[in-house]
Amino acid sequence: MKKTLLAITASALLAPSLPALAAESTLSANVGVFSDYRFRGVTQTDKKPALQGGFDFAASNGFYVGNWNSSINWLGGNSSGLESDFYIGYATEISGVGIDIGNLYYHYPGETDADTNEIYIGLSVGPITFKTSYATSDYFGVTNSDGTLYYNLSGSFELTEGVSLGASAGFTKFEGVADADGYDYSVGISYSLPQGFELGVSYVSTSGDYKTFNGDFGKSGAVVSISKSF
């Protein structure tokens, strides 16, 4: 469940920002501590803290590759308690519209039945991004759920120097699962600190059959985070 850039994403609070085209290739890294790991509105740590981090390589021609990792506890006893995501993609801009196309693989050492592969496309105009993800495998261990779709509309807006507002709304359309579709929402504030640190706080919620399907894991909650980019 890949996360990048804003600490207030609080583990998928917002869809990852589309990679910006750079004049030269860049290698970056990030690490953070979160009071809860939320993915598409659902806690992955039973509302307990998570340690997260990863790295990204972006080439000047628009191609990028990366890895992101988080502690988890939603899987069974064979799980290593780790989620490790791997992604590759291409980002460009045409007539002021950002385009991001890629593949994202979610890996759970010790519980590979939950491993999931998604292809995605994102479009952005200014601070607004719309992203669609399509599962080419079973969706996080749910039998016969390949073809599940996730749609996300998000935005990040600078309120003042060093302070940003982020908001996100997503919709999960399950394949092969009845009475499970629904929405997730989030809103948060991030504050840039010296030395590349960032403080974030957000509120995350779900609704519809999706909330019932996820039970206590889909209940609303707040997330506080501190992260650092390198």
Image: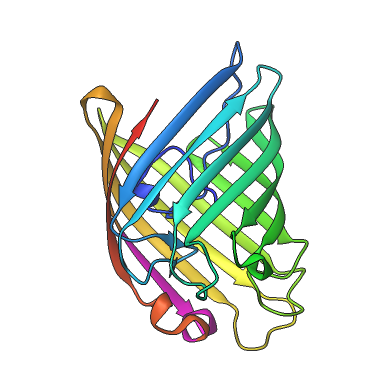
Please determine whether, in this image, residue 139 is positioned above or below residue 8.
below
- Is residue 48 in sight in this rendering? yes
The foreground one among 125 and 86 is 86
Can the viewer see residue 1 in this picture? Answer: no
> Does 210 appear above or below 106?
below
Give x and y (percent) for residue 3: 49, 46
Quadrant into which the C terminus falls? top left
Q: Which residues are magenta?
A: 203-212
Q: Nearer the viewer, residue 224 or 85?
A: 85
Residue 105 placement (x, y as % from top left): 67, 52
Q: Is residue 205 magenta?
A: yes
Q: Please state which of residues 155 and 177 is positioned toward the viewer in this rendering.
A: 177
Asked whether, in this view, residue 23 is left or right of residue 162, the answer is right
Q: Is 67 contained in the magenta span?
A: no
Q: How far from the left and from the top, in percent, is residue 34?
A: 31, 53
In this rendering, position of residue 105 left or right of residue 76: right
Residue at (57% x, 40% y) in the render: 67
The residue at 69%/24% (across/down) is 62
Q: Position of residue 69 (x, y in %)?
A: 50, 48
The residue drawn where x is 27% and y is 63% is: 222
Vertical order, 18 against 8 (above or below): above
Q: Residue furthest left?
A: 194
User: Is 131 positioned to the left or the right of 6 in the image?
Assistant: right
Q: Quadrant of the N terminus?
A: bottom right
